[in-house]
Amino acid sequence: MMAKRFLDPFFPNRPVDDPDRFAGRNTQVDEAIDSLYQIANGNPKHTIITGDRGIGKSSLLFQTRLVAQGDNRLPERLGVDMGCDGYDFVCASHDAAPDQDVGILASGLLRDLQTTVGRFLEKFSLELNLGGVLTVGQRTPENVSIADIVHGFCTEVEKAFKQIEKKNKTGLLFFIDEVDRLPVDCGAATFFKLATEKLARDGWTKTGFICAGITGAIQDMENEHASIFRVFRDILIPRLESNEVAQILEDGFNKVKCSYEESVAAKTVKLCAGFPEPVHIMGSEMLSVDIDKNIDDTDFDNAKEKVLKEVRRNKLHSMLQQAGSGRYQEIVNAMANYDKTHVPVAHISKALGLEQNQFSVNMGELIKKNVIARVDRGVYCFVDPLLKEYIRAFGPISFDT
């Protein structure tokens, strides 16, 4: 007997775009809205949302933009004080990438700003070549300084602001996702520092930057410009608490009128290690294998097997391949066989029969490859908690031909 088809209430493959389905993060939502309030009142608090990969940074960035454009559903549901009846910011966005620099970043923001403002202002255009020193989408030529780009960018921002003020808009916001993907030495930190200072100095204080990037993004930018911490307010997204995981499951199951056993929530908490994506994956698959409108331990076990063998097998196998051969496979295997999420390096050392300094380089490479993450000094975890279960189910990879 197969389950009746349903509209999946979970979001395993994309940021949560519906405020009614955004779970938890009350403190972080409050901080993000405070940033909007400060900018709206001429006290710009530029913001960077940080956290582990897959922790929900893009979802919070998306929700912040919705609030900035007048959608009050999330703060009203969470009981967060808006400080006003609502906001009406003009917003422009840009998704960062490894092959970009400040020239592409600045022109990309202006291009989206022109499109956005053009929707309510006829015959509006910006000089997307930034004062003649850079064409759209072009990397910064060697003879063009970041100061030149900042000057051209701010000139166009001021031009736009003068027009949107006539429409009684709250202010102007620039949203940049995955800012950590920009090369560390591309000049982004200097761009943000100079641009925010110039805009404030020239009186355009209702303009703000709101970014998102993995934990350490702001520290990486500090290596380029030591004052970057004074530019950005860091909103750190922690891993989900057990009650937040349970709330995501409950909300999803309720939407399709399905009950569930409490043990299912407890098992999901342990499996997903505080990451929202695997919670949504498991929620979705538990519904797909259920046949009696009540999610129990059997449904959990069947969903987990389906995720590892079908739904995420290719992705997890690819991650395991990416780890590398030999000692790298021995390390991830040792980590997978540790009962808890956070693995002390002493356990890995004992499993490998090696001193810590004999495999420290390998640990660093696994971090660079985005297979594992450093939780604290001498403590590590898998970036994707499902990889641990995959290794336990299928074992490490042998690269022998």
Image (tube, rainbow, N blue to C red):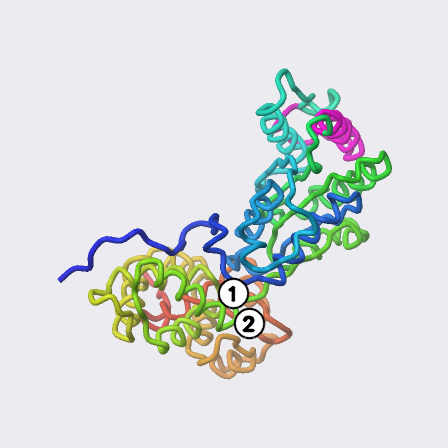
| Residue at position x 69%, y 25% in the image | 134
| Residue at position x 41%, y 62% in the image | 251
Residue that lies at the very extreme toward the left in this rendered image: 1
Q: Earlier in the sequence, mark 2 or mark 1?
A: 1
SS at mark 2 in the image: strand
Q: Relative to 383, say whether 164 is above or below.
A: above
Q: Amino acid at mark 2?
A: Tyr
Give, as a single range, the part of the protein colored magenta. 135-164
Q: Amino acid at mark 1?
A: Ile
Number of numbered markers = 2
Residue ID for mark 1: 372
Residue 95 vs residue 275: left or right? right
User: Residue 338 falls in which quadrant of the image?
Assistant: bottom left
Residue ID for mark 2: 380
Residue that lies at the very extreme toward the front in this rendered image: 85
Q: Position of residue 94 (x, y in %)?
A: 59, 38
User: Residue 248 falls in which quadrant of the image?
Assistant: bottom left
